[in-house]
Image (tube, coloured by chain):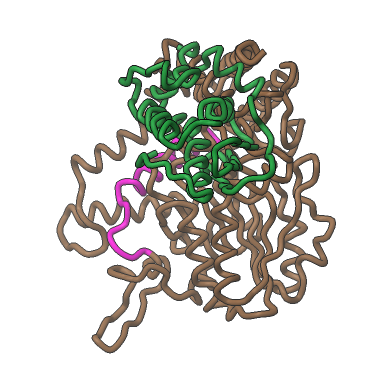
Chain colours: A green, B brown
Amino acid sequence: MMDQLYQEIILDHYKHPHGRGLRDPFEGEAHHVNPTCGDEITLRVRDDLSDISYDGLGCSISQASASVLYELLKGRTPAEVNEIHEAFVELMQGRGQVEPDEDVLGDGIAFAGVAKYPARVKCALLPWMAFKDAAARAGVSVNPEVKA
Amino acid sequence: MSFDVVRVRGDFPILSREINGHPLVYLDSANTSQKPRQVLEAMKVHQERHNGNVSRSVHTLGTESTEAYEGARATVATFIGAANPDEVVFTKNSTEAINLVAWTAGQFLSLGPGDEIVVSEMEHHSNLVPWQLLCERTGATLRWFGVTDEGRLDESQLDELVNERTKLVSVVHMSNILGTINDPARLVARAREVGALVMLDCSQSVPHFAVDVAELGVDFIAFTGHKMLGPTGIGVLWGRAELLERMPPFLAGGSTIETVTMGGTTFAPPPARFEGGTPPITAAIGLGAAVDYLTALGMDDIHRHEQDITAYALKALAEVPGVRIYGPASPEGRGGTVSFGVDGVHPHDVGQILDDLGVEVRVGHHCARPVCTRFGVPAMTRASFYLYTTTDEIDALARGLEQVRKVFA
């Protein structure tokens, strides 16, 4: 059962995060906190999406999710970012009923198991919500409505 | 053997449950305790046989309910050594009990700029935030005791911290995160010298060892029913009668009044003055039954059992590689609440893997974020014990932690 949650991909991203560390320059920044557990993330976005940088404290799920976000969204067009962001949020809010599309979500499909643990969905979404705010501040619009 | 933990466990139906295919190992009693059959039965019998509203009916059911409700108050009063049942105010929980004092203190202590309220860095948010708000409202200054590296209250600045400007000191009796038991004797003596009141947050102490308000010499204590085998929704504020007498109503309404005209209202004496609206009658009766259960077993025997479990757990945890314990490392001056970290693994992940093995612990900042900050971590994993905890359960925890280390190796 734990294998579904802690997939190798997630543990790999957690132990060896991609793109971690805050970098300059950036046009939008957001700091998000999960008040129930104290996890936090600061995420920066360039307005042309050529870089996304982040730093944070948190569990394997939230930290791996930030690493996957970096891999998936960096260097994409706003339209692609929208599609991927929407697909990830849909997967996380699907209570384990959504079949993820690997072509869209790449390593993000490893989070399918997390959706079965309501208490952990917020962990996975933390960087994605921070990204949405940071992107908006950088003038890049990301749309999906989120009820986390 | 005076304390038969197997027999005790037989009284708790939930303890025979399985979680994820494993026997339930419930190590989260500091969060909320489980309830024995005797408590559940007392509440069921009340609902099925005696239910009526209290203090306002002449009929038989109303009278029986009132007697049961006031009986619970008297039981609680005896349990904590109160001079009089009227010193026991039923609230929703500890948080409401503390808020009751904090929201009325501005008025009855005539607080203003220059006055000081003292808390500690060890507080649960519910014994910190209400005082922050009080200070914001009145212009008084909030000050606090620090915490030592060993997780003890740092009293080295006591005489400076509690001074002629201090109006009230409110500290925790037993920390919900470090397990530290604070001896308030020096603090109370100093507060008396300068004329300050002392409140003790007893949410984690009253359930676990004998607490006598007269012996403690404090002015107020707060605790909650659901952490001491009772139901949720019932808590207690105990206050010295002459202080309660001076305090204005907090949540005014029915029951709190003496006479009401359209032009104004005079208020009932305590405790009715502070119990606006229909109270949680069944929950109070459940709390009374919980106190009876604890008393029958004996608080000293319960405490001794928990001390044994705590000593065993501290040793077992210390033997797991990569585990760091926060708070006192030996069972002296601490209770059965042990917080720890596992090297390189976030508490959420620790808690998740333990749950998969049926071991229920709490993870996060435990509503005591300043304590986490003090020890430089965003969160901790906490195992907390009670009268039904066994050494086998501690072994299950230790085995679970090995599994955690394996997954994150």
Q: Quadrant of the N terminus of chain A?
A: top left
The image position of residue B308, as x and y in percent, is: 67, 25
Q: Residue at x 63, y 16 (%)?
A: B408
In the figure, residue B137 lies in which quadrant?
Answer: bottom right
The image position of residue B307, as x and y in percent, is: 66, 30
Q: Residue at x 58, y 38 (%)?
A: A39
In this picture, is B396 found above or below A20? above
The image position of residue A16, as x and y in percent, is: 66, 20
In the picture as drawn, the residue positioned furthest to the left comes out as B59
In this picture, is B179 found above or below B383? below
The magenta stretch spans residue A137: no
Of helix, strand and loop, which mostly describes the magenta segment?
Answer: helix
**Number of marks drawn:** 0
Q: Quadrant of the C terminus of chain A?
A: top left
Q: Residue at x 57, y 29 (%)?
A: A70
The image position of residue B378, as x and y in percent, is: 65, 39
In the picture as drawn, the residue positioned furthest to the bottom comes out as B263
Residue B255 in sight here: yes
> Relative to the observer, which residue lies in front, A9 or B121?
A9
Q: Residue at x 52, y 51 (%)?
A: A137
> Relative to the observer, which residue lies in front, A2 or A69?
A69
> Relative to the observer, which residue lies in front, B326 or A102?
A102
> Relative to the observer, which residue lies in front, B82 or B92?
B92
Residue B391 in sight here: no
In this picture, is A116 found above or below B131? above
* Magenta segment boundaries in residue numbering: B275-298
In the picture as drawn, the residue positioned furthest to the right comes out as B156
